[in-house]
Amino acid sequence: MDGKKKNVHEGHRQRMKKYFVQNGFKGLEEHQILEMILFYAVPRKDTNLMAHRLLDRYGSIAKVCDAPIDTLKNDFGLSESTAVLLKMIPEMARVYSESKHTAEIIDLDNAADILRSKFIGANVEKVALALGTANGRLIMCDIVCEGSINATEMPIRKIVDLALRHNAKYAYVAHNHPSELCLPSRPDLETTRMLSETLYSIGVVLADHIIFTDTDSFSIHSHTKFKKYFGK
């Protein structure tokens, strides 16, 4: 009987894998996608039920992957390898996205696409900086500050030091709002003004300040009423 059950599961997995090879995740429900991911850490159990339980608790694959490892292990009986696999998904998505933007030209049109990858899977506030040459070549793009939710201050001195060290001519700054509200606050705007003026004093143009949430982005420079915060 056990062997028969095993063969049923193996047949189901093979059918799911064949479907993925032909179609990717297109047409699959979220629980089926999570079920397939779990195949690779749970070789013999029915991962469909496991996927349903996780999604019933958290509501989405993203929130499942953001759950603490200890909670995944203690509340759902997942092995450490299974929990680590789930935590690797947003990190792999970030690395994959970043690898598409190596040695690129950065400008106002693509800055958000380049910087967004730095915030994949982020559940605390972070500040990212991208620097460009006079002709727009991307010099660097990285997280320069990270803190607890709503507690990170813009590291102006560090940004200035990095701009000088890389002999940059343009700077693009971004931070995320874990609260999901993708609009600049008054402190965001005043910080933009201060950073713009400080960078201008060393010959660097602050081209944009972008705010990200999980699902949206807001370019402060692209809104006419906020351009005054970018100084000269």
Image: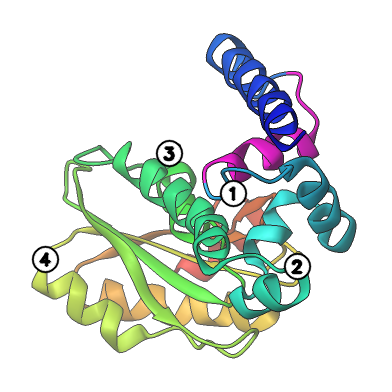
Q: CA distance from mark 1 to mark 4?
A: 47 Å
Instruction: Name the element at disc 4.
Output: loop
Q: CA distance from mark 3 to mark 1?
A: 40 Å
Q: Could you tell which of marks 3 and 1 lies nearer the N-terminus?
A: 1
Membership of 86 in magenta stretch: no
Disc 1 + disc 2, Cβ < 8 Å: no
Coloring scheme used? rainbow
Amino acid type, residue under disc 2 in the picture: Phe
The part of the chain drawn in magenta is 27-40
Give the residue at x 63% y 54%. 218
Amino acid type, residue under disc 4 in the picture: His
**Residue receiving disc 3:** 110
Disc 2 + disc 4, Cβ < 8 Å: no
Closer to the camera, 12 or 174?
12
Quarter containing the N terminus:
top right
Closer to the camera, 140 or 17?
17
Instruction: Name the element at disc 1.
Output: loop
Comparing marks 2 and 4, which lies closer to the viewer? 2
Left or right for 189, reference 208: right
Disc 4 + disc 3, Cβ < 8 Å: no
Q: Residue 166 shows which numbered tag?
A: 4
Q: Is residue 11 visible?
A: yes
Give the residue at x 32% y 81%. 198
Q: Could you tell which of marks 1 and 4 lies nearer the N-terminus?
A: 1
**Residue receiving disc 2:** 76
Instruction: Name the element at disc 3.
Output: loop
**Residue receiving disc 1:** 42
Query: Can you give x and y, in whole percent of width and height, for residue 107 in the image?
Result: 36, 42
